[in-house]
Amino acid sequence: MKIAVLGPGGVGGFLAAALDRVGVPLIVVAREQTAETIARDGLRVTSGLLGDWTARPRTTARLGEPVDTLIVATKAVGLAEAVERVTPAADPQLVVPLLNGLDHLPWLRRRFGERVAAGTIRIEADRPQPGVVVHTSPFLAVGLAHDDPQRRPALVRLAETLQRADVPATVGESEAAVLWSKLVRLNAIACTTSAWDRPIGEIREDPETRAALEGCVREACAVATAEGAAIPVERVMVELDAVHATLGSSMQRDIAAGRPPELDAIPGAVMRAGARHRIDCPTIARLYELVAARAGAPRAA
C-alpha cells in the first residue's frame, strides 16, 4: 500500500513517521518550506509510547503521482488550501480524513466522491516546529468506517498497515458511530479546558466546571443518538474520569499559541447537528462563547 499523508502536523507527522519507520511506501505532502525542512532534517518524533526516532520519508509540495491511500491530517481551517496540493494524477482509491468534527466529510466527498471514508484518531500530539512531533500521552487509536460495505476491504487493509506501524486501528460498523464516539469526548474536553484554561484534572475536581463537563457530554450524546450513534453518557464520563489529570486539548494549545481555535469544527459541528434535530445544546453554546471571548474569535452564528 502506497500512502500519502497530507499535512505533517502533530497527527500527520506522527503517522507519517510511524509508517516510514516500518518501511511503508510513503509520501508527505506539505507546504514548500515544511517539505524542504523535512527533506533536510527528517521528521523527529518524541513519543512516550513508541520511543524517539527520526524518520526520513519522501516529501513534496504537490502530489502528482498515484497513491493507494491519501490520509488528510490538516486542520479544518487549512483544508481547502491543502487539498489543492493533490492533483488529479494522484487518483487515491481511498481518502481518509483525520480532522476533528463532521463537516469536512461531505466537503471532501464533493472533491473525491465516495472514496472518502470516515476516520478519527485519538492522540495527544503537538508540532512545536516544522518537522518535530511530540506525542505526549499514551492515547493512540485510529477508527475507520464507511457506510458502503464494498469499501470495507480497503479500510481493513489500511487498518492492518497502521497496526504494523504500532498504531492501533479498527474498522467500525458505521460512519456515525466512529465520528461521534470521538466527537462527544473531544468536544467536552476541548470546550472545558479551553474555556477555563485548565487541565482536565482541575476541571473534574471543581463542582462548577465538572457540571459543565457533564453537560457537554449529555448534550452531545443526545445529538449523537439522533444522528444514529447511541453513545451512553455514563461510558463517556468513565473515560473522562480515567484520563490523566494533566490532559489538555489541541484547542487550548492553539489559543495559547495565538492560533485560531477549532470552535466551528468541534462545538460548532455539534450545535449544527443539534439544530437539525431541534436539540438545544445550552452548555456547549455557553462554553463556545467563553472560548471565543478568550481567543478573540467570532461568536457562534
Image: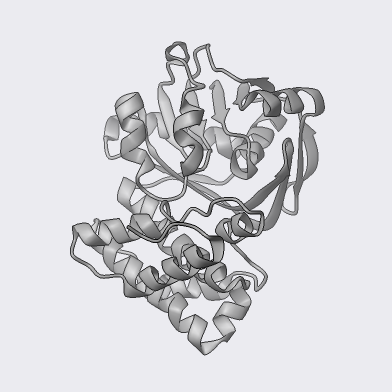
Residue 98 screen position, x and y as percent: 48, 42
Whether residue 248 is visible to the viewer of this picture, yes or no, is: yes
In the picture as drawn, the residue positioned furthest to the bottom comes out as 207
Whether residue 98 is visible to the viewer of this picture, yes or no, is: no
- What residue is drawn where x is 58% and y is 85%? 205
Q: Nearer the viewer, residue 258 or 253?
A: 258
Q: Is residue 209 above or below residue 108?
A: below
Colour scheme in the image? one colour
Q: Quadrant of the C terminus?
A: bottom left
Q: Quadrant of residue 198?
A: bottom right
Q: Nearer the viewer, residue 119 or 129?
A: 129
How many numbered marks appear? 0
Q: Quadrant of residue 155?
A: top left
Residue 59 screen position, x and y as percent: 66, 21
Q: Is residue 203 above or below residue 230?
A: below
- What residue is drawn where x is 37% and y is 57%? 268
Q: Quadrant of residue 215?
A: bottom left
Q: Determine whether, in the image, residue 121 is placed left or right of residue 61.
A: left
Residue 256 screen position, x and y as percent: 65, 59
Residue 222 screen position, x and y as percent: 28, 68
- What residue is drawn where x is 61% and y is 70%? 197
Q: Is residue 273 above or below residue 32?
A: below
